[in-house]
Image (cartoon, rainbow, N blue to C red):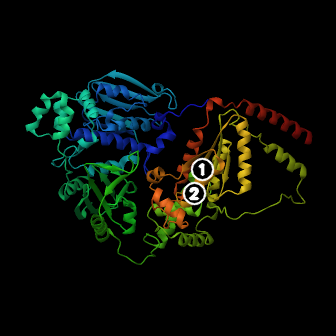
C-alpha cells in the first residue's frame, strides 16, 4: 500500500528542492544566499564583520555568533525545522533557522560535504540516503572538538563563477558591514543599522519559546524597549510576554543614503559611478534607487538579494500591477540599477518566500516609474516598438541563441508560443506581439538563419501509408526489422494501487507529455477543450476495467490559467466522477516562476466573470511554464502515486532474454 509522501522530503530530495530555487538561480546560489543572509543578520548583533574565503570551489563564511546546541541537534532531522526561526520565534536572525536546513540540503546535492564550526565543535554533514522515509537516515553528521572561540564558520561547495556577481552585490548593498574576501578588506561605512523585529508577529507562546533559548535582557534589548520599562518587565516574569508586546517599539526602516553607496562602489570598482539617485517613501517601506553607469543590476530587500522577477509592485487595492522586471522593460530601462528596498515587515507572494511584494499607491508607483524612465530609459526611437533590443541584428542573435538553448536543454522540439514567453520574460520583446514574432520567425526560417527543425507544428498532420521501393531487398528489410525489434516493456502499474492518466489542454505541448507518458507507461490525452460523448464513454469504460482490478483512478490535468482552462477542469470532475488533480497551472507556479500573463483575458462573459471573481483578472498559458519545469512537474506529480516497492522488473528481463534468443534463431534461419 502506498504511503503518504512525507513533507520533509520536499526539503531533501532533488525534485522537491527545485520548488525552493527561484527562477534564474541555482542550487549553488541558493545555498550561498541562505548562509550569507544568516551571517549578515547575525553579525549585526556582534561586530558587523564577515570573513569569506574561497578555495577550490569551497566557500567559507565566518562571523561572530554561536549556534545553540539544541539547534545543531536538529540539523540532521529534516522533519524538524533547524530552529523556530521559520515561525519567527528567533530574534537572533541569521545564526539559526529554516535557511540553514535548506542550505545544507541544496549544498550537498553533488555529494560534497557541508561543514559547521561553532561552539568549539566541527560538524561534517554529508548525505547518507536522500530519499529515506526515515528522516534520521538522510544525513550523516560527524563531530569533533576544535577551538573556534566565539565564531561560527560555515563551509560548502559552490563554484566561484556561480556566486561571483552575487558576492559583489552583497558587498554593495551592505555598506554597514565589513567584508574580508580572501584577505582583501572592504571596510564598512558607519551607519546606524539595527535589526527589524516585528513584535506583532509573536504570540505569547512564541515569546515563551524564545526564553528557552535566550536571556531575557537580550530579548528586551532586541525589541527596542525603553530603559524606563526594562526593570518592570524583568520583575514581572509571569507577564513577561504581555509586557514585552506592550512596550516594544516598532523599528522604522533605516536607509543608507547616496554617500555610503558611492563609497562602497569605489571600494569595489573605481570605474562604476552613480549617475542618478532618489529616495522614495512607500506605503510600508523606503526605497533607494541608484542608476549606475554599468550593466550591473542589483535588487535588494532588507540587504538580501533577489532578481527583478521576484519583486512585485502592488497598488493599494491589492490588485497586482507588475513585477519589477516588467516595469524595467516597459520603460525601456537600459542602465545599471541598484534597487534597494528597506521594509520592517516584508510581505511575500508565495509560501517559499521567493517573491516579495512592495505595496504602493498610484502616486508612489508613478514616482518609481518616472525616475526609471527619465534617468535610465532608452529615449531612442530608431528601433521597432515590438522588441527591446538595440537593433534587428541583436534581436535575431538573441532569438536564435534562446531557441537553440531551449531545444538542446530538452532534446525535444519547441513551440513558437514557448519561445514567445521566454522572449517576453527576458525583456527581449513586448508582451502582446505574438503574431509579429510569428511572422518574424517565419522570415528567419525562410532565410535559413533559424533552423526550422527546432520547431514542431502540432496543428497539421500527414497521413502516410507504409510502402517500399521496387528495388528494396525484402530479406534485408526483414533482417533489419528483427535486429531492431525491442520487447514491449511490462506495464509498471500492474501491481500498483493507482491507475493514473495524464490529461492536458494544449495539443501543442504533446511532445513533452508523450515523453513523460512513455517513461511512466501511462496514457496521456490532449483533450483540446471539452470532451466528446464518445471519448467520455471510452474513458469511463477504461476506468471501470481498472476499478475491477481494485485500483484507485486519478487524472492529472494540466491546462491554462484562464476561464476556459478552469471550466474544462471543473467539467472533467463532474462528468467523470473520479479524482482529477489540477497539477498546472496554479497560482503558486505563476508566482514561483514569475510567469508572463496573457495580454487579453478571453472567454464569454459569464465564465469570464466567474473566473475574475474566483481567480482575478490575469490569465496565463501553460506554454509560459519553462519546458524543463513542466517536465519536472509532470514527473513529480506522477511519482506521488507510484510505489517503487510494488514494481518488479523480473518479467522485463525474462522477456528481453527470450526475444534475443528468438531473434537470433530467426536471423540464423534467414541467413
Q: In this view, does 73 lie above or below 284?
A: above
Q: How far apart are marks 1 and 2 (CA)?
A: 12 Å
Residue 315 coordinates in the image, percent (x, y): 33, 61
Label count reads 2
Q: Can residue 328 be seen in this view?
A: yes
Q: Out of 180 and 137, give the one closest to the viewer.
A: 137
Q: Out of 563 and 335, give the one closest to the viewer.
A: 563
Please name the residue that numbered disc 2 is placed on. Answer: 567
Residue 668 coordinates in the image, percent (x, y): 89, 38
Mark identifier at residue 298: none
**Which residue sits at x=90%, y=49%?**
475
Q: In this view, does 384 lie above or below 470?
A: below
Task: Please state if 565 lies on the left or on the right of 165 as rendered.
Answer: right
**Which residue sits at x=12%, y=28%?**
235
**Which residue sits at x=16%, y=37%?**
221
Q: Is residue 66 visible?
A: no
Please identify the quarter of the rendering in which residue 637 is found: top right
Residue 538 coordinates in the image, percent (x, y): 74, 50
- Crowding at label 2, few (<14), some or many (≥20) Cα neighbours within 10 Å? some
Task: Farthest residue to the left: give it.
Answer: 228
Please name the residue that numbered disc 1 is placed on. Answer: 557
Determine whether the residue tagged by mark 1 lies in a helix, strand or loop.
Answer: strand
Task: Please state if 517 lies on the left or on the right of 661 as rendered.
Answer: left
Amino acid at each position: 500500500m502506498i504511503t503518504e509522501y512525507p513533507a520533509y522530503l520536499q526539503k531533501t530530495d532533488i525534485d522537491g528542492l527545485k520548488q525552493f530555487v527561484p527562477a534564474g538561480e541555482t542550487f549553488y546560489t541558493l545555498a550561498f544566499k541562505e548562509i550569507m543572509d544568516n551571517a549578515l543578520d547575525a553579525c549585526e548583533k556582534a561586530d558587523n564583520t564577515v570573513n569569506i574565503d574561497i578555495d577550490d570551489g569551497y566557500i567559507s563564511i565566518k562571523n561572530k555568533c554561536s549556534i545553540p546546541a539544541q539547534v545543531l541537534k536538529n540539523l540532521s532531522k529534516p522533519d524538524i525545522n533547524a530552529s523556530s526561526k521559520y515561525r519567527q520565534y528567533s530574534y537572533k536572525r541569521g545564526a539559526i533557522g529554516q535557511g540553514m536546513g535548506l542550505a545544507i540540503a541544496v549544498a550537498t546535492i553533488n555529494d560534497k560535504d557541508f561543514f559547521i564550526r561553532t561552539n568549539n565543535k566541527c560538524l561534517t554533514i554529508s548525505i547518507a540516503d536522500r530519499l529515506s522515509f526515515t528522516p534520521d537516515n538522510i544525513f550523516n553528521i560527524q563531530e569533533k572538538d576544535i577551538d573556534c572561540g566565539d565564531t561560527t564558520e560555515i563551509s560548502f561547495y559552490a563554484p566561484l563563477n556561480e556566486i561571483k556577481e552575487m558576492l559583489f552585490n552583497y558587498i554593495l548593498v551592505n555598506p554597514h558591514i565589513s567584508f574580508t574576501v580572501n584577505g582583501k578588506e572592504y571596510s564598512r561605512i558607519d551607519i546606524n543599522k539595527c535589526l527589524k523585529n516585528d513584535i506583532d508577529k509573536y504570540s505569547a507562546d512564541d515569546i515563551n519559546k524564545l526564553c528557552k533559548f535566550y536571556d531575557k535582557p537580550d530579548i528586551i534589548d532586541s525589541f527596542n524597549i525603553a530603559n524606563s520599562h526594562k526593570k518592570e518587565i524583568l520583575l514581572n516574569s509571569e507577564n513577561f510576554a504581555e509586557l514585552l508586546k506592550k512596550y516594544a517599539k516598532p523599528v522604522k526602516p533605516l536607509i543608507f543614503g547616496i554617500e555610503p553607496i558611492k563609497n562602497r562602489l569605489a571600494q569595489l570598482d573605481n570605474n562604476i559611478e552613480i549617475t542618478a539617485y532618489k529616495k522614495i517613501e512607500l506605503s510600508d517601506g523606503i526605497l533607494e534607487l541608484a542608476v549606475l553607469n554599468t550593466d550591473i543590476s542589483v535588487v535588494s530587500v532588507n540587504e538580501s538579494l533577489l532578481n527583478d522577477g521576484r519583486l512585485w509592485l502592488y497598488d493599494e487595492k491589492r490588485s497586482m500591477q507588475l513585477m519589477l522586471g516588467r516595469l524595467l522593460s516597459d520603460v525601456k530601462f537600459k542602465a545599471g540599477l541598484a534597487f534597494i528596498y528597506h521594509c520592517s515587515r516584508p510581505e511575500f507572494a508565495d509560501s517559499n518566500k521567493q517573491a516579495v511584494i512592495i505595496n504602493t499607491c498610484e502616486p508612489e508607483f508613478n514616482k518609481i516609474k518616472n525616475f526609471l524612465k527619465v534617468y535610465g530609459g532608452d529615449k531612442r526611437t530608431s528601433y521597432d516598438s515590438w522588441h527591446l533590443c538595440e537593433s534587428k541584428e541583436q534581436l535575431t542573435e538573441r532569438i536564435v541563441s534562446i531557441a537553440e538553448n531551449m531545444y538542446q536543454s530538452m532534446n525535444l522540439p519547441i513551440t513558437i508560443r514557448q519561445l514567445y514567453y521566454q522572449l517576453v520574460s527576458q525583456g527581449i520583446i513586448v508582451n502582446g506581439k505574438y503574431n509579429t514574432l510569428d511572422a518574424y520567425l517565419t522570415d528567419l526560417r525562410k532565410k535559413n538563419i533559424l533552423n526550422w527543425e527546432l520547431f514542431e507544428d502540432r496543428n497539421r498532420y500527414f497521413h502516410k501509408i507504409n510502402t517500399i521501393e521496387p528495388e528494396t531487398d525484402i530479406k534485408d528489410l526483414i533482417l533489419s526489422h528483427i535486429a531492431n525489434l525491442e520487447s514491449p516493456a511490462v506495464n509498471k502499474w500492474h501491481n500498483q494501487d493507482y491507475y493514473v492518466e495524464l490529461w492536458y489542454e494544449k495539443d501543442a505541448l504533446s511532445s513533452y507529455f508523450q515523453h513523460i507518458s512513455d517513461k511512466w507507461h501511462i496514457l496521456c490525452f490532449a483533450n483540446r477543450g471539452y470532451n466528446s460523448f464518445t471519448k467520455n464513454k471510452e474513458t469511463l469504460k477504461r476506468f471501470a476495467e481498472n476499478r475491477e482490478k481494485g485500483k484507485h483512478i486519478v487524472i492529472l490535468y494540466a491546462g491554462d490559467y484562464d476561464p476556459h482552462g478552469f471550466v474544462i477542469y471543473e467539467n472533467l470532475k463532474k462528468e467523470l466522477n473520479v479524482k482529477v488533480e489540477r497539477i498546472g497551472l496554479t497560482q503558486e507556479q505563476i508566482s514561483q516562476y514569475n510567469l508572463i500573463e496573457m495580454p487579453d483575458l478571453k472567454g464569454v462573459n459569464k465564465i469570464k466573470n466567474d473566473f475574475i471573481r474566483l481567480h482575478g483578472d490575469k490569465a496565463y498559458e501553460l506554454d509560459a511554464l519553462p519546458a524543463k519545469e513542466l517536465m519536472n512537474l509532470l514527473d513529480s506529480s506522477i511519482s506521488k502515486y507510484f510505489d517503487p516497492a510494488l514494481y518488479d522488473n523480473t518479467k522485463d528481463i525474462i522477456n528481453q532474454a527470450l526475444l534475443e534468443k528468438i531473434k537470433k534463431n530467426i536471423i540464423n534461419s534467414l541467413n
